[in-house]
Amino acid sequence: MVLILNIETSTEVCSVSLAKDGETVYLKESTEGMNHSRLLTVFIEQLFSENKLDKKMLDAVAVSKGPGSYTGLRIGVSVAKGLCYGLGIPLISVGSLKTLGVYTATNFSRFTNITTDAEPLFCPMIDARRMEVYTSLYDLAGIEIRPVSAEIITSDFLAETLEKQPVLFFGNGAAKCAGVLQHENAVFAGPTTTSAAFMTHLSNRKYVAKQFEDVAYFEPFYLKNFVATIPKNKILG
């Protein structure tokens, strides 16, 4: 039996799940905003207590590596590394866009009934503020065919692709693009939020393949450099 704790904090969703042999058996999450520093360890403790599980029974911890919220990723990775270091178990990382893309490609019939001869493609989008999103593109088999990038969405985004086949747009960055991408093959359907439950297949696959991270040196995939903002109203001493 393989038990993996999955942690997803790359967006406004704080989410943890327990996977047993590649199946999600427990999920705890909040979609109420960036409360990860307050909720994440509480959710993990609840996961152990409600499942009457000792931490030492875990085989690995998987964490969403990004891209996404700088603060959310930093919190999730810090907690995951702490657990792995303390328990002496492997750390697994899973891309946040890949998690969304593969999950939706695998389950796309739940979200839309596209009737076309051309196979659909899947474009997860994570909000990067204003009209910018983190995005990539996956085929029906869940294979990445367009690398992860930060994009300012305009009307010609994926224009050539949309002329050939339908593309599903989803994730918390997709809604703000709906008014811009108005091609008949642009379909806005799929999960609107991230979830640790979506990580199960990929984290289990990485565990079986022994694709682990170095607990001491692993860092999130921020994609863009973090820029701290300066308050407009300065308080003079």
Image: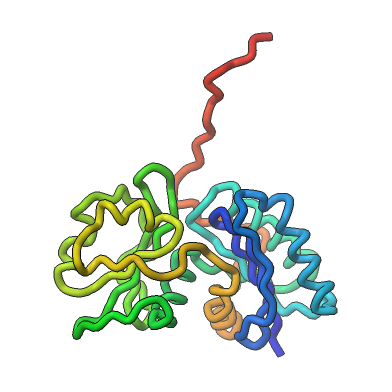
Q: For the N terminus, which image quadrant?
A: bottom right
Q: Horizontally, is 88 left or right of 142 in the view?
A: right
In the picture, measured across the screen, residue 118 lies left or right of residue 110, that is left
128, 211: nearer the viewer: 128
- Which residue is found at the position 68% from the left and 73% from the top? 5
The residue that appears at 53% across and 69% down in the rendered structure is 94
**Measured along the vertical axis of the image, is residue 141 above or below residue 61?**
below
Q: Quarter of the image holding residue 81?
A: bottom right
Q: Which residue is drawn at 64% across and 57% down?
A: 76
Tell me the quarter of the picture where residue 158 sits. bottom left
- The quadrant of the image that shows the C terminus is top right
Q: Say which quarter of the image contains residue 214.
A: bottom right
Location of residue 44 in the rendering, given as x and y in whole percent from the top left corner = 75, 65
Residue 42 vs residue 31, the one in the foreground: 31
- Front-most of residues 192 and 11: 192
Question: How many discs mark residues in the rendered view?
Answer: 0
- Horizontal side of residue 95 vs 217, given as left or right: left
In this view, the residue in front, 114 or 137, is: 114
Where is 21 relative to 135, above or below? below
Residue shown at 62% from the left, 53% from the top: 32
The location of residue 220, given as percent across then percent down, is 55, 56
Q: Which residue lies furthest to the bottom in this view?
A: 1
Chosen colour scheme: rainbow
Q: Where is residue 62 in the image (x, y as percent from the top left)?
A: 63, 70
